[in-house]
Every structure is written in C-alpha cells, then in structure tokens.
Image (cartoon, rainbow, N blue to C red):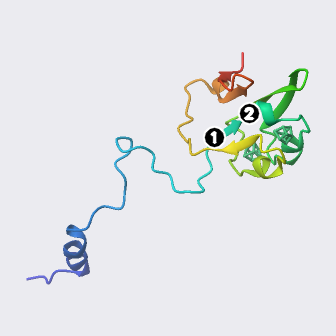
C-alpha cells in the first residue's frame, strides 16, 4: 500500500482553518488599505494647474475649464494604470484614490468618464 504523501498532512492541517479567501461579491470587495482603485475628483478644490496631467505617465487624465474657476476631469479608465501619481502631484488634494475596482464596461467608450462639479461620473458623449 502506498504511504500517504506530504499533501495528506497538509490537508489535515488546513482542513479546520478558515479560508483566507473572501466570499466575493457577497461580503464586499474587502480591499486592503492602500489599494489603488478608481480616482475621485473634488472639483471645488481644483485650481486648474494641470500638474496631474503633466505627471500622469499614461496620459489618462485631462483637466478642462468649464467656467470661472470651475474645472472638470476626464479620466480614461482604460489608460489609467492606477499608480496614484496624479494624487501625489495635486497640491490642492483635488484628487483621491478609492478602493473601487469594479470598472468593467461592455462598451469601451464608457471607460472615458467625466468628473465634474456635480461630482457625478458621466460617460463621455
Ligand atoms: S493637480 Fe489638482 S489642482 Fe491641479 S489641475 Fe490637477 S486636480 Fe486640479
Ligand atoms: S492614477 Fe496614474 S495613470 Fe491614472 S490618471 Fe493618475 S497618474 Fe495617470
């Protein structure tokens, strides 16, 4: 008879342990602290300096003036590499990283989103 391999010992050892994986999506995303997901824009803090645009390594963000001291951000979620450089470059804290990673869309055109004064995400027309 074959002797049980090392795997048998491991199976017994781990059988009563709680799984380290999460029950996604039932128990939420549970992303760890510091996870870099979708950007959030705070238009009232933006001064239109475009430092975020200048420093973005993938050309994924564009800041446009929409009125007197009013700006909107267009973010291409397909180009963004979620590095957080724009957040670090913004001295006015007008950008922040969220833990939102559920960004898939059926239509790639919907991955270009405009964040404006209403702070509502709008797919680019
Ligand atoms: S760096 Fe900040 S303040 Fe400057 S344009 Fe970008 S979001 Fe606005
Ligand atoms: S997170 Fe990185 S890639 Fe995405 S818009 Fe900001 S600087 Fe560009």
Q: Tell me residue 43's x, y (percent).
A: 77, 31
Q: Do the residues labelled 2 and 1 touch (CB within 8 Å)?
A: yes
Residue in front for this viewpoint, 104 or 51:
51
Quick check: which quadrant has ligand 1?
Answer: top right
Label 1 neighbour load within 10 Å: few <14, some 14-19, many 20+: many
Q: Quadrant of residue 20?
A: bottom left
Residue drawn at x 67%, y 21% is 122
The span from disc 2 to disc 1 (Cα, nearest Å) is 9 Å
Q: Mark 2 points at which residue?
A: 75
| Lateral position of residue 69 relative to residue 88, left or right | right
Q: Residue furthest top?
A: 125
Q: Tell me residue 63's x, y (percent).
A: 84, 32
Which of disc 1 and disc 2 is earlier in sequence?
A: 1
Q: Tell me residue 73's x, y (percent).
A: 78, 30
Q: Tell me residue 42's x, y (percent).
A: 74, 34
In the rendered image, the vertical position of residue 66 relative to residue 81, given as above or below = above
| Lateral position of residue 3 relative to residue 36, left or right | left
Please tell me the numbered disc located at residue 38: 1
Residue drawn at x 34%, y 41% is 26
Some atom of ligand 2 lies within 8 Å of the CB belonging to the residue at label 2: yes
Q: Which residue lies furthest to the front in this view?
A: 44
**Disc 1 secondary structure class:** loop
**Disc 2 secondary structure class:** strand
Label 2 neighbour load within 10 Å: few <14, some 14-19, many 20+: many
Residue in front for this viewpoint, 47 or 58:
47
Residue drawn at x 72%, y 50% is 84
Some atom of ligand 2 lies within 8 Å of the CB belonging to the residue at label 1: no
Q: Looking at the rendering, in which quadrant would you find the N terminus?
A: bottom left
Q: Looking at the rendering, in which quadrant would you find the C terminus?
A: top right
């Amino acid at each position: 008879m074959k002797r049980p391999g090392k795997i048998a010992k491991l199976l017994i050892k781990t059988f009563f342990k709680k799984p380290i994986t999460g029950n996604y999506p039932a128990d939420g995303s549970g992303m760890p602290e510091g996870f870099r997901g979708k950007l959030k824009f705070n238009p009232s803090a933006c001064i239109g300096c475009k430092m975020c645009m200048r420093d973005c390594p993938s050309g994924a963000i564009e800041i446009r003036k929409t009125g007197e001291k009013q700006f909107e951000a267009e973010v291409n979620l397909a180009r963004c590499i979620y590095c957080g450089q724009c957040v670090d470059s913004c001295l006015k804290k007008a950008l922040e990283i969220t833990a939102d990673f559920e960004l898939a869309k059926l239509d790639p055109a919907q991955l270009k989103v405009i964040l404006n004064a209403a702070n509502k995400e709008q797919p680019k027309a």
